[in-house]
Image: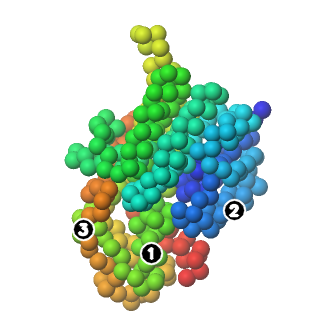
Amino acid sequence: MKKSILVTGSAGFIGANLVLKLLDNETDVQIVGIDNMNDYYDVSLKEFRLSEIEKKSKESSCEWTFLKGNIADKELIENIFVKYAPSVVVNLAAQAGVRYSITNPDVYIESNLIGFYNILEACRNHPVDHLVYASSSSVYGSNKKVPYSTDDKVDNPVSLYAATKKSNELLAHSYSKLYDIPSTGLRFFTVYGPAGRPDMAYFGFTNKLLKGETIKIFNFGNCKRDFTYVDDIVEGVMRVMKKPPQKETGEDGLPVPPYAVYNIGNSSPENLLDFVDILQQELISAGVLPQDYDFEAHKELVPMQPGDVPVTFSDTSALERDFGFKPTTSLREGLRRFAKWYKEFYNC
């Protein structure tokens, strides 16, 4: 049987980019993707990503299989593990978004807790070499100490979304301890890029500006975000996948949990006002907005929203130490690539 890699959330922003990279870099591997294709945002974007994967798969020596389904369906997940016996599982399926978790909590419990539990149970009953899963910088809540380190306590989430991601880390730790499952959690910091999520600021701002609507800049522009380009995120995931935590036995005769958590971020937080200024420059340069666009007339400074935090700032020293990798794509370069993609995709 071919070596098999399971990527959940494979029509999602990070998931699709990871599958594309795997098809480029792996040899003679079966890549299995699952996604429920929900309508949290424009499904045509997910379909576009899948079409790009289909094209790439025709040029690859790897075999690509896509399954439409929900990781909260325990029987489906069990059947996937029985049929494909994945040696590596990358769990990127999740309900994302801080603000949406305030108004629609049910979907977060279903996907981020029940779905993740089903993945853990499958890894327990069908042992894998490595479980890699998406956590989030949101777990740091309103921690005052920056940059955020994985050694910091993260016991005070300020949104349900953050609480579910911290729960993932706790559940993974217990399964690693009890069942010797090598697992690595990755705390992603504000991921952006072409064909990203429309609910993210850079994408939503672009949509609004193009329609002549006003964009709201929270905390009166005094927020800072550690924007991380999607290719850097994927490179980090690829490196982590190939190096699971070592299995060891502790003094109690039980496994020392083969468990790790890393930050993946740019370690260079940008002020939101600077960010929107770079964004509008690149949108004008790409021809998405006209040269004489009156940007000042289309922005509004507003208070902080519930669940938001004033700053995100990643300490990636552990990632650099263990994998020799640090994200390097500048915000301007990343937004330039997004603006060019947006111009082409929406033909504007």
Q: Disc 1 or disc 3, which is closer to the eye?
A: 3
Neighbours of disc 2 within 10 Å: few (<14), some (14-19), many (20+): few
Q: Identify the residue position indicated by label 2 in the image.
A: 51
Viewer-proximal residue among 124 and 58: 124
Res. 223 in view: yes
> Which residue appears at 45% of the width and 39% of the height?
168
Q: Identify the residue position indicated by label 1 in the image.
A: 206
| Tag 1 near tag 2, CB within 8 Å | no
What is the CA distance from the residue labelled 1 to the residue labelled 3? Answer: 21 Å
Res. 238 in view: no
User: Measured from the top left, where is residue 291 in percent x and y?
Assistant: 42, 87
Q: Quadrant of the N terminus?
A: top right
What is the CA distance from the residue labelled 1 to the residue labelled 2? Answer: 24 Å
> Which residue appears at 59% of the width and 80% of the height?
347
Q: Disc 2 or disc 3, which is closer to the eye?
A: 3
For label 2, the SS is helix
Tag 3: residue type? Pro
Of the two numbered discs 2 and 3 on the same chain, state the one appearing first in sequence. 2
Q: Quadrant of the C terminus?
A: bottom right
User: Measured from the top left, where is residue 188 in percent x and y?
Assistant: 43, 49
| Tag 1 near tag 3, CB within 8 Å | no
User: Measured from the top left, where is residue 327 in percent x and y?
Assistant: 43, 50
For label 3, the SS is loop
Q: Identify the residue position indicated by label 3 in the image.
A: 303
Position of 175 relative to 91 (above/below): above
- In terms of image quadrants, where is residue 78? top right
Viewer-proximal residue among 98 and 33: 98
Tag 2: residue type? Ser
Neighbours of disc 1 within 10 Å: few (<14), some (14-19), many (20+): many
Viewer-proximal residue among 127 and 52: 127
> Which residue appears at 41% of the width and 50% of the height?
161
For label 1, the SS is helix
